[in-house]
Image (cartoon, grey):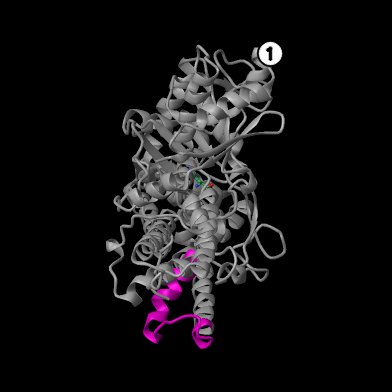
């Protein structure tokens, strides 16, 4: 269950009954900051005191009295000017965890009543260019959000909106004919494409004939000339090969690869419609939306904006903006989605505000969300370059390889110190799980709206808040069953709380659903990371304080084995939702 939702509903009913209110009202339930004040705090009496003109403490006492009769409440105490501090009942919580063990797939977290069709637009690298860390962050975040939504029961469509169309292809086509090296294109496609593009754009600056040829080839490409189409297709294919290797490494997949080129044929129609509806107009040959003039609902911030939103250039070329407007319409009309998420760098915030505003003017009602994120920084605190000072590419493939190497070093260290029990032949696959998991966790553990520093050494740490530490705690909990020769699935409890560490552990375990729900509604995977990190700490404290296999009696042993099983499973499923592997042994 979603504990917070359950408690809020029950507490609200208690508030209404205790105060004999005609209308239901929120209990204003919040988790307490300090466990000495119980598990949750209700703030409703404070707000209602003002409204009803009665002393909040008097109302709080009535609410507390009502709550004391509920089966999930251990105690309800009035504190301060009128808070109600709620401590949950251990047996109630223990039963929730025990019940969750019977639900291998959802761990007791019931899926949403009304599933939606949600499209997630993430990764979106550009053809003929190196995929950069911003794309990596989008890929990791988008994948985690997709998994959380699926876990909650939504139907998810993963779409990779590749940057595979635009004016650069004219230059690439003439450049390839002039400077291209077919062998290099095969061996190291992106390096070759970037080299050719650089040469061609330099040449075009000083050579008007060359520039003109590039424009001609672009026009031919856009008009469907077979030869140019074939060349363009080849650029796309070779780039796809490189990026697909990275996706395979990351364990990320897509349902659709509808890049910008997929919308090419719709763009003229989009601009025509915008003009017909009075949303865009001509200005010196170009077509744009002038936010100050358009009629209809426009966000106040855009209303004031002087800069128009360009949808067609003077030379007739369409833009990134035009494509994104066409994309929204396609997703509504052809895919029938209820919600579209765009996991893209926050520097594109204004772009999406404008695309969404145009969509609204066109009558689009589906939910549109720009899930923005901050910059990945290098050790120097500046945006991490996928290119070092000498210009040599520090590509994502290299970055991921380094993460795996670093992980392998740490694993060998752990083996030498006797902390890790790993066989030599297991190192490569374990180093992959640990290294890639570390990069993902380091990204996801930070609130996406902030920048973070890419620090490989800290990422691959087996202690502290890092991916390998969580994988280690998972493997340790799973190994308890293996060592004892017990099947994890046979640990079904019932769980009984006898020690304070058990009380803390069940309190954490029951919050899993809340954490996943927040990832699926707020698109903040760090909330699940925090949950799993706390779970790991509380599991360690429990395991240190409480004997499991040689517990005082059989009932206690069964209860504790069930707690271990619940932890192992939640850690495994939780890491899985972050796209991180959870090896059974290490
Ligand atoms: N290719 C774009 C870039 O590299 C990202 C695409 C994001 N998706 C979208 N529908 N605009 O910045």
Residue 365 percent location from the top left of the image: 43, 23
Taking 290 as reference, is 180 left or right? left
Choose between 311 and 352: the one closer to the eye: 352
The residue range painted magenta reads 414-438
Say above or below: 314 vs 132.
Answer: above
Residue 578: quadrant of the picture: bottom left
Graded by Cα atoms within 10 Å as few (under 14), some (14 to 19) or many (20 or more), the crowding at tag 1 reads: few
Q: Which residue is mark 1?
A: 53
- Number of numbered tags placed on the structure image: 1
Q: Nearer the viewer, residue 284 or 523?
A: 523
Q: Position of residue 308 (x, y in %)?
A: 62, 26
> Which quadrant of the figure contains the C terminus?
bottom left
Q: Is residue 465 above or below residue 101?
A: below
Element class at badge 1: loop
Q: Quadrant of the N terminus?
A: top left
Magenta span: predominant SS is helix
425 magenta-colored: yes
Q: Residue at x 47, y 24 (%)?
A: 13
Residue 302: x and y in percent read: 63, 24
Residue at 40% across / 29% down in the picture? 329
């Amino acid at each position: 269950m979603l504990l917070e939702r359950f408690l809020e509903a029950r507490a609200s009913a208690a508030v209404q009954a205790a105060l004999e209110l005609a209308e239901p009202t929120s209990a204003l339930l919040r988790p307490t900051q300090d466990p000495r004040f119980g598990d949750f705090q209700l703030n409703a009496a404070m707000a209602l005191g003002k409204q009803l003109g009665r002393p909040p403490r008097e109302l709080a006492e009535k609410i507390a009295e009502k709550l004391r009769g509920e089966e999930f409440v251990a105690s309800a105490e009035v504190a301060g000017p009128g808070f109600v501090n709620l401590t949950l009942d251990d047996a109630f919580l223990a039963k929730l965890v025990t019940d969750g063990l019977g639900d291998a797939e959802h761990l007791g977290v019931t899926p949403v009543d009304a599933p939606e069709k949600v499209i997630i637009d993430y990764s979106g690298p550009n053809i003929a260019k190196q995929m950069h860390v911003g794309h990596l962050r989008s890929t990791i975040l988008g994948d985690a959000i997709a998994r959380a939504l699926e876990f909650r029961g939504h139907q998810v469509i993963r779409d990779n909106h590749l940057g595979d169309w635009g004016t650069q292809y004219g230059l690439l086509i003439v450049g390839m004919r002039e400077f291209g090296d077919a062998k290099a294109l095969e061996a190291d496609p992106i390096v070759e494409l970037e080299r050719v593009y650089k040469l061609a754009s330099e040449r075009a600056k000083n050579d008007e004939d060359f520039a003109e040829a590039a424009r001609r080839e672009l026009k031919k490409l856009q008009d469907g000339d077979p030869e140019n189409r074939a060349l363009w297709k080849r650029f796309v294919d070779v780039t796809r090969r490189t990026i697909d290797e990275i996706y395979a490494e990351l364990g990320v997949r897509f349902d659709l690869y509808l890049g910008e080129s997929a919308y090419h044929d719709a763009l003229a129609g989009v601009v025509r419609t915008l003009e017909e509806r009075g949303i865009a107009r001509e200005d010196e040959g170009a077509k744009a939306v002038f936010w100050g003039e358009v009629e209809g609902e426009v966000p106040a911030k855009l209303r004031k904006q002087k800069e128009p939103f360009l949808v067609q250039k003077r030379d007739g070329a369409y833009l990134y903006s035009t494509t994104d407007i066409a994309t929204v319409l396609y997703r509504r009309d052809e895919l029938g989605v209820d919600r579209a998420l765009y996991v893209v760098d926050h520097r594109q915030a204004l772009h999406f505000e404008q695309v969404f505003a145009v969509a609204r003017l066109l009558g689009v009602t589906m939910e549109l969300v720009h899930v923005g994120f901050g910059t990945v920084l290098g050790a120097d605190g500046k945006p991490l370059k996928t290119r070092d000072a000498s210009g040599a590419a520090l590509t994502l493939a290299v970055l991921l390889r380094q993460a795996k190497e670093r992980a392998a070093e740490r694993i060998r260290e752990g083996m030498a110190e006797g902390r890790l029990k790993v066989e030599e032949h297991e190192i490569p696959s374990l180093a992959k799980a640990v290294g890639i998991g570390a990069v993902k966790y380091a990204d996801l553990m930070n609130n996406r709206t902030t920048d973070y520093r890419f620090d490989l050494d800290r990422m691959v740490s087996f202690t502290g808040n890092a991916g390998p530490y969580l994988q280690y705690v998972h493997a340790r909990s799973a190994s308890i069953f293996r060592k004892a020769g017990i099947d994890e699935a046979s640990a079904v409890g019932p769980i009984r709380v006898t020690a304070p560490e058990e009380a803390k552990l069940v309190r954490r375990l029951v919050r899993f659903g809340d954490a996943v729900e927040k990832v699926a509604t707020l698109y903040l995977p760090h909330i699940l990371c925090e949950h799993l990190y706390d779970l790991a700490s509380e599991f360690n404290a429990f395991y240190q304080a409480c004997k499991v296999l040689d517990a005082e009696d059989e009932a206690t042993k069964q209860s504790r084995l069930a707690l271990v099983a619940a932890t192992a499973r939640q850690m495994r499923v939780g890491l899985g939702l972050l796209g991180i592997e959870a090896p059974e042994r290490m």
